[in-house]
Structures are given as structure tokens and as C-alpha cells.
């Protein structure tokens, strides 16, 4: 071996490796601390008395009846346009109802509340139903646009054009009750997902109202 042959310096090489390892460990530790901080700093879920929770509960009640009525007319109408519309209402509102159920589960809140219907809307400037505690359950359901048991029985018994017209009358009123609820939670709520679904309800049901009124006119339904 000549005197010019380079001599390996293992101690230097290992020192470099050690420094790199220490740097990697430091980065990993920093990332871990940041991740742990992020996990503990997750935003709080809506509270039991929040507008978000009240909307999720009340709109599930509302959607349940809409699905029932839509499937009833879908089963027996001979009007193709009305059959398509009723199917769309049933599918859309079934999906939204399931999503609202899931929100309450995720938030650790019960599906039902001890508060009267629409109490969460009392702080709304435009959509409050006033002192809900002073109203009966039937009065609150009526203000929500809900059909009565007698009206549901009439829908089940009706056939042909009378059934189509009765459904349109009931569902138009139903939608007119739902849209202010959605607008109220957009005004009062905090959860971004709730506001997004509420916005979709306002847009979708406003469009369906136009379609139902057009069908009413075509079928010459009386008001």
C-alpha cells in the first residue's frame, strides 16, 4: 500500500450518522408533540341545547313524516312526474335523516329532547315560533307544517287524482314548514356540516315546491 492511499476514518463517519439520527429523532418528537396537541385541541361538539342539536332532532321528526307520505303516493300514483318527485323526496330525506341521527351519536347527545319542538329557534330574528313552552304539541306540529293523523289516514284511503292532489297539498305545507327551520339553523348554528345540509334543504325543497305547484296546476287541484 502506498503512502498516498486514503485512510478510512470510521469514527468520523459514525459521528455524522449519529448527528443525522439525532436530527431525525428531534423532528419526529416535534411532529408527535404537534399531533398530540392537535388531537387535544379538537373543536367542541354542539351542546345539548344548541341550535345544531335542536335542528337535528326536530328535522328528523319532520323528515320521517315526509318519507312516509312520499312513499305512500309513490306506491299508488299513476302520474309519472309525481312518482319521480315523491321517490326523490323519500330518498333524499331518508339520507338526511340518517345523517342527522349520526351527528347526535357523534356528539354524544340523546336523539330526543325534553324541550318542546322548535325551542332552539326562539333566538332567531325571522323564524322564531315564540314561547314554545306555552303551546301544545299539536300547535307546534301544525306550525312545523306537519300533517295530522286524520290527514295521513285520508291520504292512505284516497286513490287516483284525489290522492295526488291531497299529497301535493300536504307536502307543500310540509316543505313550507321545513325551509324556515333550515334557515334558522343557518342563522343560529355553529357546525359547518349542519349548515351545509341546511343549505341543501333550502335549495332542494324550494325547487320541489315549484315542481309540486306546477303539478297541482296541471292536475287542476283545488286549493
Image (tube, helix red, strand yellow):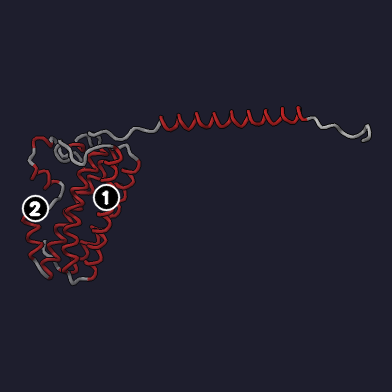
Residue 34 lies left or right of residue 152; in this view the side is: right
Picture coordinates of residue 18 (x, y %)? 67, 28
Which circle marks residue 212 in the picture? none
Q: Which residue is mark 2?
A: 148
At a point 8% along the width and 35% down the height, the residue shown is 134
Image quarter hosting the N terminus: top right
Report helix, strand or loop for mark 2. loop
Q: Which residue is mark 1?
A: 98
Q: Are marks 1 and 2 in contact (CB under 8 Å)?
A: no
In this view, the residue farthest toward the front is 1
Picture coordinates of residue 204 (x, y %)? 29, 55
Quadrant of residue 85 within the rendered picture? bottom left
> Would you place residue 212 above or below residue 50 in this image?
below
Sequence-earlier tag: 1 or 2: 1
In this view, the residue farthest toward the left is 150
> Would you place residue 88 above or below residue 101 in this image?
below
Report helix, strand or loop for mark 1. helix
* Badge 2: residue crowd in 10 Å (few <14, some 14–19, many ≥20): few
> Would you place residue 199 above or below residue 159 in this image?
above
Q: 5 or 170: which is nearer to us?
A: 5
At a point 31% along the width and 43% down the height, the residue shown is 194
Between disc 1 and disc 2, the foreground one is 1
Q: 143 or 109: which is nearer to us?
A: 109
Quadrant of residue 165 within the rendered picture? bottom left
Image quarter hosting the C terminus: bottom left
Quadrant of residue 208 within the rendered picture? bottom left
Amino acid at each position: 500500500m502506498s503512502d498516498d492511499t486514503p485512510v478510512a476514518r470510521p469514527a468520523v463517519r459514525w459521528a455524522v450518522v449519529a448527528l443525522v439520527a439525532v436530527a431525525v429523532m428531534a423532528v419526529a418528537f416535534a411532529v408527535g408533540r404537534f399531533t398530540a396537541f392537535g388531537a387535544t385541541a379538537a373543536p367542541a361538539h354542539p351542546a345539548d341545547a344548541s341550535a345544531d342539536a335542536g335542528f337535528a332532532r326536530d328535522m328528523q321528526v319532520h323528515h320521517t313524516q315526509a318519507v312516509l307520505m312520499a312513499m305512500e303516493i309513490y306506491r299508488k300514483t299513476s302520474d309519472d312526474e309525481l312518482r319521480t318527485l315523491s321517490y326523490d323526496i323519500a330518498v333524499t330525506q331518508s339520507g338526511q335523516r340518517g345523517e342527522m341521527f349520526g351527528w347526535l351519536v357523534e356528539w354524544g347527545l340523546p336523539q330526543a329532547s325534553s324541550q318542546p319542538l322548535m325551542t332552539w329557534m326562539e333566538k332567531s330574528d325571522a323564524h322564531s315560533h315564540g314561547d314554545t313552552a306555552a303551546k301544545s304539541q299539536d300547535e307546534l306540529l301544525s306550525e312545523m307544517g306537519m300533517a295530522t293523523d286524520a290527514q295521513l289516514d285520508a291520504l292512505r284511503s284516497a286513490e287516483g287524482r284525489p290522492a295526488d292532489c291531497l299529497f301535493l297539498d300536504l307536502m307543500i305545507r310540509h316543505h313550507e314548514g321545513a325551509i324556515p327551520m333550515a334557515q334558522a339553523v343557518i342563522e343560529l348554528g355553529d357546525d359547518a356540516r349542519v349548515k351545509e345540509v341546511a343549505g341543501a334543504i333550502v335549495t332542494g325543497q324550494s325547487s320541489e315546491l315549484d315542481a309540486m305547484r306546477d303539478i297541482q296546476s296541471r292536475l287542476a287541484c283545488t286549493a
